[in-house]
Amino acid sequence: MLTTDAVKQVVDVAAGNAEQVDADGAFPAAAIDALQGSGLLGLILPEAVGGLGAGPLEFIEVVRELAAACGSTAMVYLMHAAAAVTVAAAPPAGMPELLSAMASGKALGTLAFSERGSRSHFWAPVSTAALSDNGESVKLLADKSWVTSAGHADVYVVSAGSASGIAGEVDLFAVPSSDSGLSVVAPFAGMGLRGNASSPMTLDTTIPVTSRLGEQAAGFALMMQTVLPWFNLGNAAVSLGLAGAAYAATIAHTGSARLEHLGESLSGLPTIRAQIARMGTTLTAQRAYLKLAADSVSAPDDDTLTHVLGVKAAANDAALAITESAMRVCGGAAFSKHLPIERAFRDARAGAVMAPTADVLYDFYGKAVTGIPLF
Ligand SMILES: Cc1cc2nc3c(=O)[nH]c(=O)nc-3n(C[C@H](O)[C@H](O)[C@H](O)COP(=O)(O)OP(=O)(O)OC[C@H]3O[C@@H](n4cnc5c(N)ncnc54)[C@H](O)[C@@H]3O)c2cc1C
């Protein structure tokens, strides 16, 4: 059972370590330990496997609160959740314990989709999966460009061009961190989400065919029907968590920073108040859109696809605008890192370039509403 106490305890740990995680570019180990002990890694997994059986609405709330405390922790959590729901949708036959380990927090997961060859077009991996002659094993060769929690996760959900050999078909595999064919190629040094450990990885390994998620060539459908809705909701929630933190810090700063010669605070200035109003109305509108999209994923109808496509792009752009306004409104105090705003500003740059990128999503949305196939 999910309790607000469990969320608060994790959020407190994440918030207490966020500055150091960012400064050092260190994986948020304490917050992930707290998550592992909280049950929240199984938040959206079925109770039958030890999860909490929560839905999209609870999920976006938890992700948003985590992101407001520490963007890196929230992104590590989101990638775990996206990997876990994908495993739940098509558990690999040869790994019967995997899902309960992901639900209990014993196994931290992540997605290894993006590739050097096809960049943000995650639906088109150029890596390869080749079946052995007896059909019992798969030779996996992959060059992954970004993998959040690289070197820290216990299991990687890896995409590859399908062993079917048919162009456009995709296979997904669960690869445990103990596989000696997995390599973290370089350290992660991002401008934001600096604790993410989103390093490039290579795979050159032979794994049992029973590590595949679902049937051969089921990967594309899993990406579109399972990963896309949960990842887009969660990524939008990260963006709005960061934007909300910047907004709250802006209100606090402008209310307390004094212009002594005028006898007022920064929020006494009408231009500052107008900027704050734009931030607040944008944030409120995007929160409502995210709730609408989450409701729609819970009870799908004809509009669910467009909500799933639109909500990430819109929240990503809103976070860019709100954190930029926060930087401007809070002036040199924000620029000089006296406030938590600058970290939210840097962290918020990631959402729009995470695949599916905001630009791609706007194009897909346009295609969807004008009746053009997405692919
Ligand atoms: C912090 C962080 C963590 C990440 N973690 C993971 C992870 O755990 N797993 C994972 O698989 N990936 C991860 N990624 C990778 C991410 O999902 C993207 O694949 C990556 O950011 C794309 O970068 P790129 O330089 O390859 O983009 P490119 O594909 O080169 O795109 C460059 C620009 O072109 C635009 N563009 C590309 N195609 C189109 C199109 N068809 N129409 C319009 N515009 C287009 C893009 O929007 C972008 O603005 C992460 C990225 C970041 C920043």
Image (cartoon, rainbow, N blue to C red):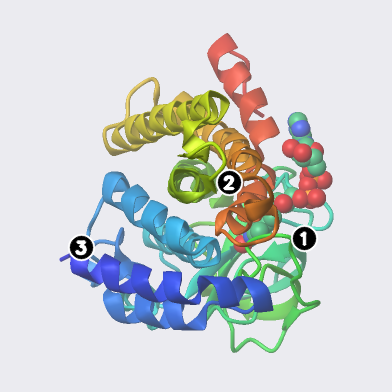
Q: To which residue does mark 1 refer? A: 127
Relative placement, left or right, of 310 versus 113 is left
Q: Where is residue 41 in the image (x, y as percent from the top left)?
A: 36, 69
Q: Residue 367, position in %: x, y?
A: 62, 18
State the residue position of label 3: 4
Give the distance between the C-alpha atoms of the residues marked 3 and 1, in whole angstroms: 42 Å
**C-alpha span from label 2 to label 1:** 14 Å
| Quarter placement of the N terminus | bottom left
Disc 3 or disc 2, which is closer to the eye? 3
Q: Where does the image place residue 355, in percent across and percent down from the top left? A: 65, 46
Q: In this picture, is 34 found above or below 234?
A: below
| Quarter residue 275 falls in | top right
Task: Indicate the quadrant where residue 370 lies.
Answer: top right
**Residues tagged 2 and 1 counted as in contact (Cβ below 8 A):** no
Q: Give, as a three-letter code, the residue at label 1.
A: Ser
Q: Name the residue under label 2.
A: 220
Q: What element carries label 3?
A: helix
The mark nearer the N terminus, 2 or 1, is: 1
Q: Which secondary structure lies at badge 1?
A: loop
Residue type highlighted by circle 3: Thr
Q: Amino acid type of disc 2?
A: Phe
First reached walking from the N terminus: tag 3 or tag 1: 3
Nearer to the camera, 52 or 164: 52
Provide residue 353's location: percent of width, then percent of height: 69, 45
- Give the residue drawn at x 40%, y 55%: 63
* Residue 26 appears anywhere in the view: yes
Residue 168 figure quarter: top right
Furthest-front residue in view? 261
Q: What residue appears at the point 47 percent right and 32 percent down from the top-left corner?
A: 268
* Up-down relation of residue 78 to residue 362 (above or below): below
